[in-house]
Amino acid sequence: MTSLGTTPSVPSVSAAGLCLSYGSTRALDDVSLRLGHGVTGLLGPNGAGKTTLLRVLATAVPADRGAFTVLGHDPGTARGRHDVRRALGYLPQTPGFHPDFTAFAFVDYVAILKEMTDRSARHREVRRVLDAVGLSDVRGKRIKRLSGGMRQRVALAAALVGDPGFLVLDEPTVGLDPEQRMRFRELIATAGEGRTVLLSTHQTEDVAMLCNRVIVMAGGRVRFEGTPAELSARAAGRVWSSTQRHPGAKAGWRTGTGAFRNVGDPPDGASLVEPTLEDGYLLTLDASEVAA
Amino acid sequence: MRGVTRPAADEPLPAAGLGRHAVGGLVRALVLPVARGLPWRPLAAGGTLGLLIAAGTRLHSDGVQPWLALLHLRAAALAFGLGLAFLLDDPARHTTATVPVRRLLRAGLRVALVAPVAVAWWGAAVLLVPAEGRPPLGDVTLEVAATAVLALAAAAAAVRLWEEPEPGQATAAVVLVTGVAAPLLMPGRWTLFVRLGVDRWDEAHRAWAWVLAGAVLVWVACTVEPVRRPLGGWSRSSPRP
Amino acid sequence: MSSTVSSPRTKALPTSTPAGESPRRRLRAVLALARVEARELLLQIPVFVVLCVYVAYVGWELWTGGGEDGAYPVLQDVDRATQPESLFLGVAVLVCVNRAVLRSRRRGTDGHFDVLVMEPWRRTVAHLLSVVPFALATALVVAAQFTGAALKPGAVGTGSFSELAVAPLAVLLLGVLGVLIARLVPSAFGAPLFVVGGYIAVVLLLSSSEDTPWLRWLTPFVDEFQADPLPSDLLGRPAAWHALYLVGLIVLVSCAAVLCGGRRTLPAALGLARAARNPVAWPAVGPARLVKAVALGAAVLTLAGAVGQSRGDSPALLAARKQASVAPEKDHTCVPHGRSTYCAFPEWTGRTEDWAAVVRRVQSLAGGAAGGTKLTVRQRVDARYGLSASATLEPSSTHGQVTVGTRWGGNRVPEFSVGVASVLVAGNEEAAAAMCDGRVVTVMWLALATTSDPMASLRDVRIDDSVSGSAIVLAPTHPLEMTAAQTTVVRELLQRPRYGVTAKVKAHWTELTSPKTSTARAAELLDVPVPKGSEKEDKCEE
């Protein structure tokens, strides 16, 4: 396992040796990780096993092998799984909605399923999360009348209701416009204060702006675990600019200035530039392809 | 990327200016994909249950009387009609809503594809009833046709009134409750669900013909896509402001 | 947008407190969900419309008094009559609760909800409970129906609590069946097709029940095409057993739904799913053992109910029915009113005053000794062939005895008048049944002249609702036959002022009540034009 970063001193979530196969496809292959407070980004290409990992950690599907604990509870027992679910907020990749429910009724429904039984306290809590995601004005509207971004925020409110200690968000910023994306980042960053948030995404900017830790997955394995700075540092000395596309570069593209930005093993005398998180990510994926 | 290159300017676009021949070609091209997209499962379930109900006439210990066979055939028609209520369900509705081929053509093609199946089904259902117990076939066929078209009209109305891509289940619920409640709650002076051998039989079947015609009109009216938002904005399929 | 997503995490919030594992709280969560689901169910169009129509229909019946004999309800029949009307509500609830259970699958929220604290089986329990308010609403409607009937001054008899419970139980049964179907067949068309198939299955059960009556009782409610009400102790309906059967079935179906709801797929149920070979053991779902035990108990209850309701009529009941049919005087309570005596089954004694009023009215028009004859009005039923068999009562040969049935109100009143008048004229019912001469005119005029609208009553007692031509006239026992000429004469008489006709009837009483008097002669005596062809029609068919 390639762990370069400092692991959190008191992990809220820790997993060891998780394996899961769908037929002959190994979706998770010996995944171990430790998550502490704050937002952890989960990066990886399509089919890397991100969603499967999130589903396992959210107790939606059991792993074939391996064990994990969430906030000290072991979901391998009925009691433990129940306790994990009490402390869990989950935003699935494709959150469904009941279009005839109002935003309030839907989040209230989820709150009941989270066993919030005191009616007035529950309604207060639902109003609080809808207010937090900025939907207090439209909480009486039916979900089918809401725009895509608003629906996504309803789903986030449903994940946040009940103030869970462990928040699992599967690509929550997909399909949002830049402004909505900024708002979402703000929300998730706030949610990360005092909680453990695991955020799966394709967007390296999300990770760069939000996460204090990052995990890169590919082919069902963890390829990197550390801080975003450490991921960027992986590309130190391996990004350069040139006037022509460099044939030996792993990746290269013409930037807005007309110069080419190359990632890979630079030739001698290349003019190196400051690496970004994305460069580190690309190189990590490339290395894992070679390893595979 | 090669896949997204524009066609050369002198290549005619295939859908431009559809002549009669072009419509024929379009229909031929559409038959297979539409047939593949039809909700066959509910149709099969409704049809099978209908046939079972028709075959149930043979279970009556002391032979089936025509009035009892009529009851069975009406129930079988309702079962098949429930399957038809799902006919216009289209999970890809929001994708196909804006294609140039009209909804009337697309929906009509669905109905045309199911029509021979329905005819074959009805033939089988009739044959399953013992010959000595069969009620007057022409009139009962009229009732069954009216029931089927009513179910289709309900499905079309659901598509017209709701944005839902698959309103079949709600439609089936309405068709079912109507089908169960109508014969029992309808005032006695309206002749529709008459018993066999009652002198109002012919009168009732004139009424069934009217129902059939009305259902066809409703189906067409609901299937034609409105160009403008109707006055008063009663249609929920209209775009949000 | 507010920048605070959460209140400080130190604040104890409902879900994050680890201590809340108490069963009471878990139950409260289920109840809260059931409440939300019940409200959603009410707002479904079919349920809402059917409930409104049901309530409106019953309200209308209560308001208008409910048909011909609505003013004189027999409570041991009224209780049963509440059952069929609840069927529509049951069907609507079945279809819509099925939709509600499948909602999260249809909308793709399953993936999310399955990781929430409330397990799928408890969500199933909430759906099952969401049907209960509709059963309670049905119970209220039934209670209103029955109370409305019981409060009528003409009400007789006693209702059965078990019969009244059947309608709410049937709604509950259909509702929980909707949940079970959703758990077994997770597709949109399961429930509607089940309803149609179930309907035909019931038809098959009912049609094949000629020789196997126990099959009939397996259906949610059993309607009888009963001709005339019977005393409540002669009904012999196993209502309590049937209610027990329904309760058992409801619990059984509910348990099955809960057990299916825990495992969402058929492969998982068969132990074939991946979870089965998973070393991280997937915990057993819910208190499955307890549910299975309850299901077993419910199966026993259902079986007990089914056996209990299938035992058929006991010899004691058959003997009691025979006695009530052949020798009713042993069961009767007799009450004198004026000169005559009125003998009725104990539950009907309250109605003797109504009968006495009719007898007084008819007798006041009669002349000769008939005006003061002591009559015995005896209530009769024919219960020998069970509830569904309709048998006509044989005319009595006892002098001065008039038969009265168990129904009252509407056409039964002029029919009874005809019975009284024919005994006054002919002496006994057997003789009256053979009447085919001028006496028919006297009988019909006596019977109808004092009613509030004689012509309407004439139309009512004739089987074809006509006021001209020949027709059959209904009476409590054997019907009378009226020829066209007799009809003409009676019509003429009924249209004349009563006091004039009364005087003539009393004056010519002996001749008018003689079998030798022809219709033409009666017309002459009563000063009415003699209709043509009356002589030909007056021949008695032997």
Image (cartoon, coloured by chain):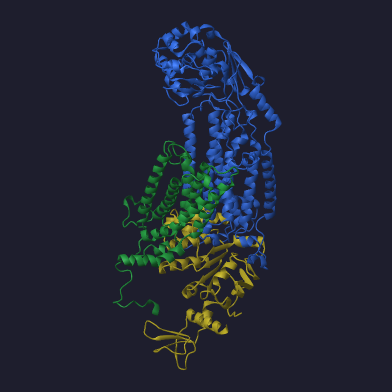
Chain colours: A yellow, B green, C blue
The answer to whether any part of residue A96 appears in the image is yes
Task: Name the residue at 42% across, 14% down.
Answer: C493
Q: Position of residue B14 (x, y in %)?
A: 33, 71
Q: Which residue occupies the foreground of this view, A155 or C261?
A: C261
The answer to whether any part of residue C2 appears in the image is no
Q: Position of residue C194 (x, y in %)?
A: 55, 50
Q: Is residue A224 above or below residue C526?
A: below
Q: Which residue occupies the foreground of this view, C288 or B183?
A: B183
Q: Position of residue B161 (x, y in %)?
A: 39, 53
Q: Relative to residue B162, is residue C71 drawn left or right?
A: right
Q: Is residue C48 above or below residue C228?
A: below
Q: Position of residue A69 (x, y in %)?
A: 64, 67
Q: Is residue C83 above or below residue B14?
A: above
The number of discs equals: 0
Q: Is residue C221 above or below residue A241?
A: above
Q: Which residue occupies the foreground of this view, B47 or A287?
A: B47
Q: Which quadrant is the N terminus of chain A positioned in?
A: bottom right
Q: Which quadrant is the C terminus of chain A positioned in?
A: bottom right
Q: Relative to residue A83, is residue B18 drawn left or right?
A: left
